[in-house]
Amino acid sequence: MADKTQEPGGIHFPFPFTPYPIQKDFMAALYQVLEAGKIGIFESPTGTGKSLSLICGALSWLRDFEQKKRQEEARLLEAEATAAPLSNGKDPLLLPLASQGTLGPPKDPAEPDWVTQFVQKKEERDLVDRLKEEQVRRRKREERLQQIRHNAQLKYAAKRMRQEDEETERLLDLSREMLAAGSEPEQLASEEEELVLAEYESDEEKRKASGADEDEDDLEEEHVTKIYYCSRTHSQLAQFVHEVQRSPFGKDTRLVSLGSRQNLCVNDDVRKLGSVQLINDRCVDMQRSRRGKKSIAEEAKPRRRKQEQRTACPFYSHERLQLLRDEVLVGAKDIEQLVALGKEARACPYYGSRFAIPAAQLVVLPYQMVLHAATRQAAGIRLQGQVVLVDEAHNLMDTITGMHSVEVSGSQLCQAHSQLLQYMERYGKRLKAKNLMYIKQILYLLEKFVAVLGGNVKQNPNTQSLSQAGTELKTINDFLFQSQIDNINLFKVEVFIRLPARPGCPQVPSAFLRLSSAQSPRDTGLLTVKSNDGG
Ligand code: SF4
């Protein structure tokens, strides 16, 4: 594909063909906005190549930004080597400090000059050390990615590891069969007993058992300046990734596509659970079991059957995830390609893609992952100092409203009440007083929510009918007073519901409260809650 160099405003914009004036203007304007660190709203008619202009404009800016940063770094390191003063008042790397008058916090007038100089020198040294570390890390990453580009390292390494695992398992089975087939071992004299080998565990096995080889710190990297591109649907995101692949930036851009576990999970046993919630819960459960983190109280208790059945996910292997993370960063891949890669490498693409975020230059993700604080945090997305491109932004308001709204039907509330009541009757005596109190509060809330809809929790939801139909809009305060729940601290109840299983609370009430997504044949009304604080 032709790489036509275009230079509107003296800026080099690689483009796959000669761009139209509208595309040149788009790229130049986008570049200016990014350079000035401002917010821009762009509109362009359908079919004018918006995505391509967006890709080439934004990635050209990132290319120039990285180049300038590298030049500044080189200059600073050279200045340090020749003992020249570091700050010329223009360095972007030093500006935040230089703008304060000195390299450091504002000078206290009572502070002697030698103290000021000492502090300044120390900050300069720290900065240089940080730059050196960054350089080493960058060089190592580039070497790794280069190796992958040329050797298809992941495929060979994953295949080799898989073969080794299979061979070890086969030999272990043979040994077990031999032992099972043999007669009872003869009694040995005590001096002979000492010659028998003790149960053996290799260092690697011990590390695996203790989880020490799965230190996630090794998978984490320093966050580089990057562009987050978000759109509404996965098909729009996939289309964007294909555009990047076709653009002149396709081969050299470190791009990572993010999706949910439902999109990216490659463990068939977990995938077949179907619903997002169940998949998430099972995966988190497996991670907990992998880490084997238990409280002292849990350790002291005899294990319950359910806990014994828990196994770690075979696709969450530290070594393979590290390889997958690097492979993800080589060449642009959409969600389907990530899943195929994960299956081939027997490593989880959900976690592999998340570990690739820090080093990525372009992160492609759905709106919800950027706009929802908890999701952003869970995915390890840091927006400070980064560029965010929102495509199809006319959908933003609907998405934000949808994200902070929830619809609960009367029959779901009745079901939740019935299940929680059964839970309390069954386990009530084994609960701690505080847990029991919260469960009673939740039952009370459910009863009042149903009552406000005109129903009754004591009756079968399928045979109840509404006394009055229609839609009513209420403020939060009106709703709280009318449903007589203004005396309950809902924030505390919410925290209780979100808590995971713990000693003293033998089952998780939230599991009982998990409302069935299947609609019941007849609803007793609909309660729609829209949060007005974004929380
Ligand atoms: S670790 Fe990955 S593959 Fe395993 S269950 Fe979780 S999402 Fe699925």
Image: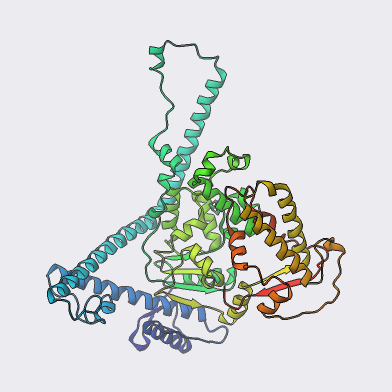
Asked if residue 111 can be seen in this view, the reply is yes
Identify which residue, 417 or 134, lies in the foreground. Answer: 417
128 to the left or right of 459: left
From the viewer's perspective, is residue 504 above or below residue 60? above
Identify which residue, 313 or 391, lies in the foreground. Answer: 313
From the viewer's perspective, is residue 304 above or below residue 49? above
57 to the left or right of 375: left
Q: Residue at x 70, y 76 (%)?
A: 481
Q: Residue at x 56, y 43 (%)?
A: 311
> Which quadrant of the view contains residue 111?
bottom left
Colouring convention used in this rendered image of the protein = rainbow
Where residue 30 sits: x, y (%)?
A: 43, 84
Identify which residue, 95 or 295, lies in the foreground. Answer: 295
> Which quadrant of the view contains residue 361?
bottom left
Where residue 61 sits: x, y (%)?
A: 38, 78
Quarter holding the C terminus? Answer: bottom right
Q: Residue at x 68, y 61 (%)?
A: 442
Total marks shown come to: 0
Quarter holding the N terminus? Answer: bottom left
Asked if residue 242 can be seen in this view, the reply is no
458 to the left or right of 276: right
